[in-house]
Amino acid sequence: MMLDDLLQGLVVLTDESGNEEEYRVLRVAELEGNHYALLQSVVVHDEEPIILRVEGDVEGDAASLVGIDDDDEWDRVAEVFDALLFDLDED
């Protein structure tokens, strides 16, 4: 996956059981040298959006999306997305 793919709008995630689900990319943000994606399920529209960290070489098509285990990191990233989405609402 490349960063361009994320910006195209759709990704397919596979859970631990091998089930695939399509997600719409709402926003991509960079914080402290890492990229993060805010995703919304295409199947379950009322599900809360999820935030995943982009790891690997996004320009070399060798990136993956991973969960954020560190609570402090998650809080900082959530604040960034809240600010971005608030700015969008203001426009």
Image (cartoon, rainbow, N blue to C red):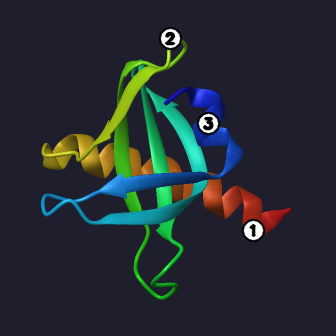
Residue at 15% across / 49% down in the picture? 71
| Amino acid type at mark 1 | Asp
Where residue 79 sits in the image (x, y, percent)?
Answer: 43, 52
Q: Nearer the viewer, residue 75 or 19?
A: 19
Which residue matches tag 1? 89
Residue at 22% across / 45% down in the picture? 68
Which residue matches tag 2? 60
Real-space Cα distance between discs 3 and 2?
A: 12 Å
Q: How many other residues sit within 10 Å of disc 2, few (<14), some (14-19) or many (≥20)?
A: few
Q: How many other residues sit within 10 Å of disc 3, few (<14), some (14-19) or many (≥20)?
A: few
Real-space Cα distance between discs 2 and 1?
A: 34 Å
Q: Nearer the viewer, residue 38 or 79?
A: 38
| Rendered view: 75 above or below 63 | below
Of callouts 3 and 1, the N-terminal one: 3
Q: Is residue 12 left or right of 86 when viewed as pictured?
A: left
Q: Is residue 25 left or right of 18 when viewed as pictured?
A: right
Question: Circle 3 — which element?
Answer: helix
Q: Which mark is residue 5?
A: 3
| Amino acid type at mark 3 | Asp
**Residue lying furthest bottom:** 46
Residue at 39% across / 25% down in the picture? 63
